[in-house]
Amino acid sequence: MTKDENEIKFSYEESIVDSDSDVEGKWPIFRAATDMKDPQFSLGMTFASKQQLREAVQNYAFNNGKEIKTLKNDKERMIVKCTQEGCPWRIGLKKVLGSLSWRILNMTDEHEGCSWVWENSMVKFSVVAKRWSTELQDHPDWMMRKFKDKVCSQEGFYVSNSQAYRAIWKAKKLRQGKVEDAFKKIWSYKEETSRTNPKTTCPVKLSDLSDESGGMLLTAISIDGNDSIFPLAYAIVEGEKKESWTWFLELLKTDLEITKSVEDEYCFISDKQKGLIPAFESELPGVENRFCVRHLHANMKVAGFQGKALKDCLWACARETTLNAFNVDLSKFRGLDEDAYQWLGEKSPTEWSRSHFSTHSHCDMLVNNICESWNGSIRDARDKPIIECLEILRKMLMGKFFEKKQKAAERKSLICPAIVRKLKKIEKEAAKYLATQWDFFKFEVGHLYGDQQEVDLEKGCSY
């Protein structure tokens, strides 16, 4: 290659590169937030720094299956070119006077005779780690072979075993660094949250427990007057342990002002997570604890008792509201499978059947689907560093609460819309059972002579 082939003519240098004062209005600006994923270059395009420029060229090369090398790189100029023989693609850039910015002066944005480069010398383990950092955070259990296969198939370039292994190691170090930085800021975040949200409880407690898994999100979800999800509290703890649940329930009890005299008015439904029941026994022994029927059925299947008939009978038992009806359905359940009946007998019906529920809490819910809905809505937040996770949750809740407040202000009825719809449905069903005067007479006579006696209503006497 001759000297001329390594040079780009900067004949328009004075007209294109003068100072950074005219960048915004005169030349196209490379916006990293939107352009970096799929860079497209144009004459005069200005980059904030050389590092930004290098990353853009790198992403362009990987996205298009090209191998690009740097022909010239000093404090003032930079030239990049496609490595494939005969290809004219190249870009020449120069640093903007009095600025850290770099601008494209000359370019040939065209590839000729180029094939996709599978073994690309631009592929470094640090580059792979950065490009796949999010996926590696979402899948910390990925082993080298699985990760390598995914990179090769999705990126379209070859990654060696060593590069894949080192990329995983690098991504873990980056993730660990982000996590550590976030935890260092937790006290400042607590103070700012308390200052801007004075009615919000935001405690931070140092844990003396060690759990390598860590990062468990505990939540307490309720329903509002319109039968909608209403998050009460959430906390990030080291794991599902009795100590963590005890700390969480202690704070919840204080915020909701649950005293001994009103404990029986509260009902908690869960899937009996590890350590939760012992925590209830110590902090809220008087509340009603129920077991989600959906989780009960899942446990029944794990125990080996499967089939639609058993499932339907279990749900029938759960939905019954009287003891007699419950016993009838339970007998049917026993007739289907004696072993399943014995297994179910170890679970108290006060935890899962309406026929045995206490009437103090005025709640007939059988499942904790509201918690599942909540968990689905916070999926994006759960894999983020602690500060970012808490901020996503806070902003989401602020938006939801404000939206509900606005809708409530627009309503004229004292009863919420969802409840009105329920009442209309109940009213329609109840209309089928309107009593006649003859029905009232039969009731009065039956009550007068007792339920055990037969009454001749035509003669008005008993026998």
Image (tube, helix red, strand yellow):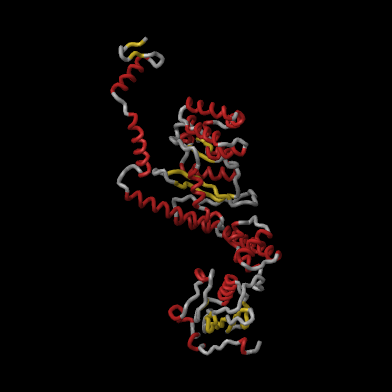
Position of residue 308 relative to residue 95, above or below, is above
Left or right position of 436 against 359: left
In the rendered view of the protein, which quadrant contains the N terminus? bottom right
**Residue 308: x %, y % from top left:** 54, 36
**Residue 407: x %, y % from top left:** 35, 51
Position of residue 433 relative to residue 403, above or below, is above
Q: Can I make out residue 190 in this image?
A: no
Q: Can I make out residue 390 in this image?
A: yes
Judge by depth and name the residue closer to the eye, 227 or 191.
Answer: 227
* Image quadrant in which you'd find residue 343: top right
Task: Name which residue lies at 49% across and 85% down.
Answer: 16
Task: Name which residue lies at 46% across and 56% down.
Answer: 395
**Residue 340: x %, y % from top left:** 60, 31
* Image quadrant in which you'd find residue 422: top left
Task: Name which residue lies at 55% across and 54% down.
Answer: 382
Q: Name, please, the residue furthest toward the left.
A: 437
Judge by depth and name the residue closer to the eye, 265 or 413.
Answer: 413
**Residue 255: x %, y % from top left:** 47, 44
Position of residue 334 relative to residue 241, above or below, is above
Q: How many marks?
A: 0
Task: Name which residue lies at 58% across and 72% down.
Answer: 64
